[in-house]
Image (cartoon, rainbow, N blue to C red):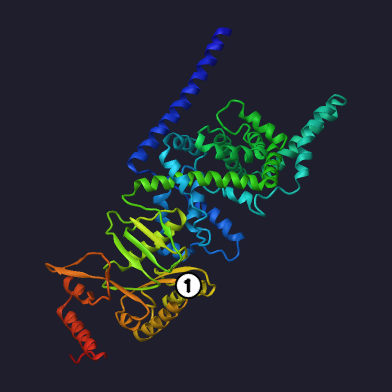
Amino acid sequence: MVNSLIIIILLVVVFIVYHFLTKNNKKLKKFRKEWESGHFHAASESFQTVSSYWENKKNIKLGYDGVDQLTWDDLAMNEVFKKLNYTQSTVGSEYLFNQLRDINPSLVQLQNNEELYTLLASNQELREELLLILSGLGKRNYTNSSSFFHENQGNKIKHASIYILLGVLPIVSITLMFSSLKYGIMLILGSFLLNTIIYYRNKSMLENELFAVSYVAAIIHAAKSLASVKHPEFTRYAKEFKQQVQPIKKVLTLTKIVAFGKEGGGEFDFIFEYIRILFLLDFISYNKIIKTVSNHKEEYRKVWERIGELDAAIAVGFYRKSLDTYCTPIFIGKEEISFGNMAHPLIDKPVTNTSTLGKCTLITGSNASGKSTYIKAIAINAILAQTINTALAEKWMMKPSFIVTSMAIQDNVLDGDSYFIAEIKSLKRIIQLIEEEKPCISFIDEILKGTNTIERIAASAAMMEWLSVNKGINVIASHDIELTEMAKHRYTNHHFRESIENGEIQFDYTVHPGPSLTRNAIRLLEILDYPASITNTANGLAQHFTRLREWEEIGKQ
């Protein structure tokens, strides 16, 4: 009988060991395939979750700029983030999202993680060991785990001492049984009834908090594992994890108490449930966990941010490997952006461009010729250069600056803003940044297109003049060719062009020096077989205005 029991135990141990070994082998196989191909399947994550670290930081830092929401949306940075997000944990996702938004021009060069990017990209053995630990931490929505090291977060349960007293009451009841069985039984039944009522009345209040706390414990457990990594190049990080985990590791034991009997599937789970109810273990342990983390916020913060940094660094290395071309940027003090064969990160097989843009640049060109894509590509690369030390170009030089855009303006029905009101509010952000004397690169697409022609051109020219005499780099795209003449002493002109081949318009999507000399709107109408009366009238009106600089009354042609 004893021998049979020993054999059964050995078989169970072998099965468990085999399961974990094969599980890790499957993960390693997956990681190697992804790293080789440059493709991965991203886990589904809510925007609220990935942005929570950024929001927590922003809310406690007055005057915090970074990449604001309008700029983020204009540049479709959520899509850029998704392409980059080869993180294995929610901590990594939140850290990387914050990293892409947390531009501080005065610290750009101090925050350079290039050494870490290079290490984790080149050292496969170390990278894979970290990937296994980070994937074990995994991704879990709505935990807001960074809130636990911010002020006024991770709220304790009110009147915690009462829960402790009620939790001790069953023990007192059992002790009382030795001197008075009758009163001891009455007290233990009464305490069980009372604690059951309290437990189920307050359980829903605590469930979300316990869900979040369980991920905090998983973070601390991952940090313990990272402290055990033996690679020589990781020694500094391992020592740091060991030091920071020491005062908060009792959270792991407390979390096990909270999870007591919750795994499901066991024959005695209902007994464990009653034990947790009788002694109010969930409430008492939760409060102890919150107290532990609250008393060691700085240690928990360092653990959290270091895990995020490592996870995000692997993601950056993975992203770089997936690119045909990238470079590390050079930062200069001159108000200039210079790049060679720059690509847009969201376009497959993009046409690349090479330019040197000074303080003020005006981009003109026909519809669909590539103006918007070009300036968006510059803006996105300017963000990536300053946040992950990576630009999709053969070379990249710029002055560290805040990046702010005014592009995809929309009516704001809820606020009652018309297109034009929304547009001038968007432009006012740029003015405010410059008035605050913050280094700034602004990108404006179709300046003031929401109003009539005369006032649009007059106001656009006035704003371009103001931008040119104040600090900051400005890149403006416009259809208004009049601006190329009005601003030629302040702005360097570049343009995009097209050609007509076999009755079709062809674009080269390449920027050229000088102002645009062509228009294609009427030609597009002709190609799409609009009635000849419309296109002939349009051509006549355009030629009349070009010749005399005044509009002819319709119906007189």
- Residue farthest to the left, as pictured: 502
**Where does residue 95 sit, x and y in percent of width and height?**
51, 50
- Residue farthest to the right, as pictured: 179
Who's the residue at 16% across and 77% down the image? 531
**Quarter of the image that includes the C terminus:** bottom left
Who's the residue at 56% across and 11% down the image? 5
Query: At numbered mark 1, what does the secondary structure look like: helix, strand or loop?
Result: helix
Residue 136 showing in the rendered view: no
Residue 156 showing in the rendered view: yes
- Crowd class of label 1 (few under 14; some 14 to 19; many from 20; radius 10 Å): many
**Where does residue 488 sit, x and y in percent of width and height?**
33, 80
**Where does residue 201 sit, x and y in percent of width and height?**
68, 45
Quarter of image, res 279: top right
Q: Does residue 20 appear left or right of residue 270 in this picture?
A: left
Q: Amino acid at mark 1?
A: Ile
**Looking at the image, which is closer to me, 187 or 377?**
377
Location of residue 338 with respect to 297 vertically, above or below: below
**Quarter of the image that includes the N terminus:** top right
Quarter of image, res 395: bottom left
**Where does residue 354 sit, x and y in percent of width and height?**
30, 62
Q: Does residue 457 appear left or right of residue 207 in this picture?
A: left
Say which residue label 1 marks. 430
